[in-house]
Image (tube, grey):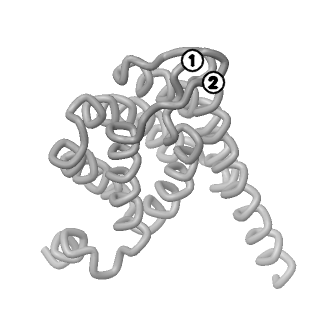
Amino acid sequence: MKLIKEIITFKFYPATLSYLLFIVLLNTIFSYVPNLSIMGEPISSADFVVGLIYVMRDFAQRESKHWVILAMLMGCAISWLLAEQQAAIASVAAFAVGESLDWSIYTFTKRPLSQRIFLSSIISSPTDSAVNLYFLYQLNWVGFGLMTMTKFAGVIVLWAYWRLKNSKQLALV
């Protein structure tokens, strides 16, 4: 019961709270900030920063384990109230697909964390990008490429961080 209370109050889960708030922020941007036109295709401003969601999710998952799914659902529920409902639907659909893939990779592979992060991004980034853009009625090659690349960039930053951290820990041993 204590764990559930801590999760609901986010008393000891700053990364998880940040992840939840970033979900709401992204959905709000998708809803209310006008699209740009790049190469004749509509592109959301959120496409440029959506890669950060992976970095935040990975820290939140490390902090709250499988409870990260609860934070994702709460972020989508708040988005339902604050953003356009279609953005919340797109978010839920993309998270359901992406998180299921990521959860499977994190749970069933026995590779080091840095490898799991990299492997999960290769599989889930393009998949959840396509699902999100499809449900937002914005699926096009430019948006798909931009969104997928920003997710890869976010994951590469996190992957490099983990590799550096692990190499320093090995040097200390």
Q: CA distance from mark 2 to mark 1?
A: 5 Å
SS type, badge 2: strand
Packing grade of label 2 (10 A; few <14, some 14-19, many >=20) is: few
Which corner quadrant holds the N terminus? bottom left
Contact, mark 2 vs mark 1 (Cβ under 8 Å): yes
Residue located 32% across and 37% down the image: 31
Compared with 10, 24 (above or below) is: above
Left or right: 24, with 42 as reference point: left
Residue located 56% across and 55% down the image: 55
The outermost residue toward the right is 171
The residue closer to the viewer here, 141 or 77, is 141
Residue located 20% across and 33% down the image: 85
Left or right: 142, with 43 as reference point: right
Residue tagged by mark 1?
Answer: 41
Mark number, residue 133:
none
The outermost residue toward the bottom is 172
Which corner quadrant holds the C terminus? bottom right
Left or right: 74, with 132 as reference point: left
Mark number, residue 38:
2
SS type, badge 1: strand
Residue 30, position in %: x, y? 39, 38
Compared with 81, 37 (above or below) is: above
Residue 105, position in %: x, y? 53, 39
Packing grade of label 1 (10 A; few <14, some 14-19, many >=20) is: some
Residue 152, position in %: x, y? 67, 40
What's under tag 1, amino acid-wise?
Glu
Residue located 56% across and 17% down the image: 41
What's under tag 2, amino acid-wise?
Ile
Residue 156, position in %: x, y? 72, 49
